[in-house]
């Protein structure tokens, strides 16, 4: 879901470091995760994990969309 939102936003440049131990720095989704966290769309599943390959529920999708729209 965060990759979808990241690409829909035009894949903007991101800066900073990846705080999640389960998102490798060379992973394709790393920039999308970093972008989503910096925009306040998500915080991950804990301070150090994101669970990038876990299921994304409909509730989470709606929450991400709501936050992405600036609400």
Image (spheres, rainbow, N blue to C red):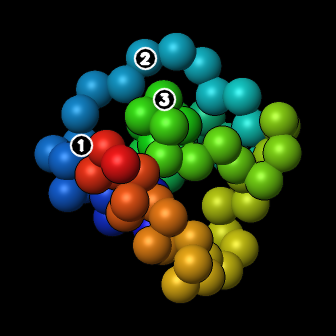
Q: Secondary structure at mark 3?
A: helix
Q: Which residue is mark 2?
A: 15
Vertical order, 21 against 65 (above or below): above
Q: Nearer the viewer, residue 15 or 38?
A: 38
- Is residue 28 visible in this depiction of the protein? no
Q: Is residue 57 left or right of residue 49?
A: left
Residue drawn at 24 percent across, 43 percent down: 11
**Residue identified by numbered label 3:** 38
Real-space Cα distance between discs 2 and 1? 13 Å
x and y percentages locating residue 5 in the rendered image: 32, 58
**Does residue 65 appear to the left or right of 49 in the view shown?**
left
Is residue 48 something one can see in this rendering?
yes
Q: Pick out the residue farthest to the bottom.
A: 58
> Against 33, is 4 above or below?
below
Report crowding for label 2: few under 14, some 14 to 19, many 20 or more residues within 10 A (C-alpha): few
Mark 2–mark 1 contact, CB under 8 Å? no
Within-10-Å neighbours for mark 3: few <14, some 14–19, many 20+ = some
Q: What residue is shown at x 71% (from left), y 74% (from top)?
A: 54
Distance Cα–Cα, label 3 vs label 2: 9 Å
Mark 1 surroundings: few (<14), some (14-19) or many (≥20) residues within 10 A: some
Residue 35 in percent (x, y) is at 43, 36
What residue sits right under mark 1 in the picture? 11
Position in image of residue 12 (x %, y %):
23, 33
In the picture, measured across the screen, residue 23 lies left or right of residue 66, that is right
Judged by depth in the image, the label closer to the viewer, 3 or 2, is 3
Locate residue 2, reporting x and y percent: 44, 58
């Amino acid at each position: 879901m965060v990759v979808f939102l990241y690409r829909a936003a035009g894949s903007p440049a991101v800066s900073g470091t990846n705080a999640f131990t389960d998102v490798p720095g060379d992973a394709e989704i790393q920039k999308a995760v970093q972008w989503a966290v910096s925009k306040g769309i998500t915080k991950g599943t804990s301070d150090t994990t994101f669970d990038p390959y876990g299921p994304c529920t409909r509730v989470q999708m709606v929450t991400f969309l709501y936050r992405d729209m600036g609400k």
